[in-house]
Image (cartoon, grey):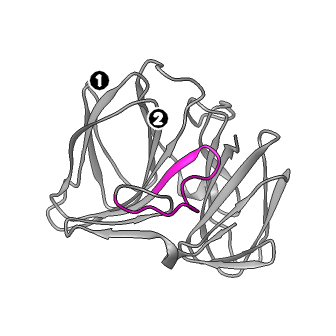
Amino acid sequence: MIHRADERGHANHGWLNAHHSFSFANWYDPSKVHFGLLRVLNDDIVAPGEGFGMHPHNDMEIITIILKGALQHKDNMGNGSVIKPGDVQVMSAGTGVMHSEFNPSSDEEVNLFQLWIFPKEKNIQPRYDQKTFKVEGRLNAIQTVASGFQKNGELYIHQDAVLSLSNPQKDKPITYAMSKKGNGAYIMVISGSVEIHGTVLNKRDAIGAWDTDEVQIKPLADSELLIVEVPMT
C-alpha cells in the first residue's frame, strides 16, 4: 500500500493548513479510512496566535509530534505546557478529556503531526504525558518515542503499538523489526527520499507493510522518517 503526498486530503482554513493521510472531517476516501488501528495521521500547520479551542475526545490514544515551532497545550486534567521540536506528547482520552491547542508565537507557524490510535480497551482513566527526545538518538537508528511495550523509557500508549522516528543518512540502510507478530508498519517520509520494497518514497509519501517481521529501508538521501507500528485488527 502506497500513499503519495499529493493524494492526501487537504483543507486550508486560513489559520489551519491541514493534510490528512486518512479520512477526516469533511474529507472522505473509502480506500483511506485507517491502517490497522491507526485512524488519523494529520499534518497540520497552524498560523501564529491561532489554534484549536477546548474540545472533547474519548477512547483514543492521541500522539502529537512537533516538527517546527511550538504548541501550547491545556486540558481539564490540569495539564498545561508548551511543546517544541524534539518533544512528543501522548494523551489517553479514555472516558473523556477536554483540551485546547494553540500556537503561542506571534510570528512563527507551528507544524505538527497528530496521530490517533484506537486503544486496547475503552473507558480507561484519561492520562497525559510528554517527553523530550534527543535528535541525535535517531541518527542512523530507530528511536522509539511511544509504545505499549515500555521498552526503553519511551512514552506509554494503551495499545500494542510503537511510534518511532529515524534519521537515516544516504546509503546507510536501516531495518525496522516488528515488536509483535501480526502488526504492520506505516512509514512516512518526513523529509528526504528512501526506497522500501522497491518503491521510491519522497517527502510526505508513505507506505504500509504487513505480513512481515521486518522492513528494509534504503535511504537515497539524508532523510527523516516516522514509523507507526500498529495491530492490523
Task: Indicate the secondary structure of the residue bearing disc 2.
Answer: loop
Q: Nearer the viewer, residue 7 or 47?
A: 7
Looking at the rendering, the stretch of residues picked out in magenta corresponds to 26-41
The alpha-carbon separation of the residues under discs 2 and 1 comes to 16 Å
| Label 1, residues with CA under 10 Å away: few <14, some 14-19, many ≥20 | few
Specify the label residue 77 is tagged with. 1
Task: Indicate the secondary structure of the residue bearing disc 1.
Answer: loop
Query: Disc 2 marks which amino acid?
Result: Met
Q: Nearer the viewer, mark 2 or mark 1?
A: 2
Taking the magenta stretch, the answer to whether it contains residue 36 is yes
Q: Residue at position x 65%, y 57% from top?
A: 186
Image check: 127 left or right of 216? left
Query: Disc 1 marks which amino acid?
Result: Met
The quadrant in which the N terminus is found is: bottom right
Q: Is residue 159 above or below residue 31?
A: above
Q: Which residue is mark 2?
A: 60
| Label 2, residues with CA under 10 Å away: few <14, some 14-19, many ≥20 | many
Q: Residue at position x 45%, y 30% from top?
A: 59
* Marks 2 & 1, CB-CB < 8 Å contact: no
Image check: 132 left or right of 185? left
The quadrant in which the C terminus is found is: top right
Q: Position of residue 54 (x, y in %)?
A: 20, 39
Q: Is residue 161 above or below residue 48?
A: above
Q: Position of residue 150 (x, y in %)?
A: 65, 30
Mark 1 or mark 2, which is nearer the start of the sequence?
2
Q: Position of residue 194 (x, y in %)?
A: 69, 76
Q: Residue at position x 46%, y 58% from top?
A: 23
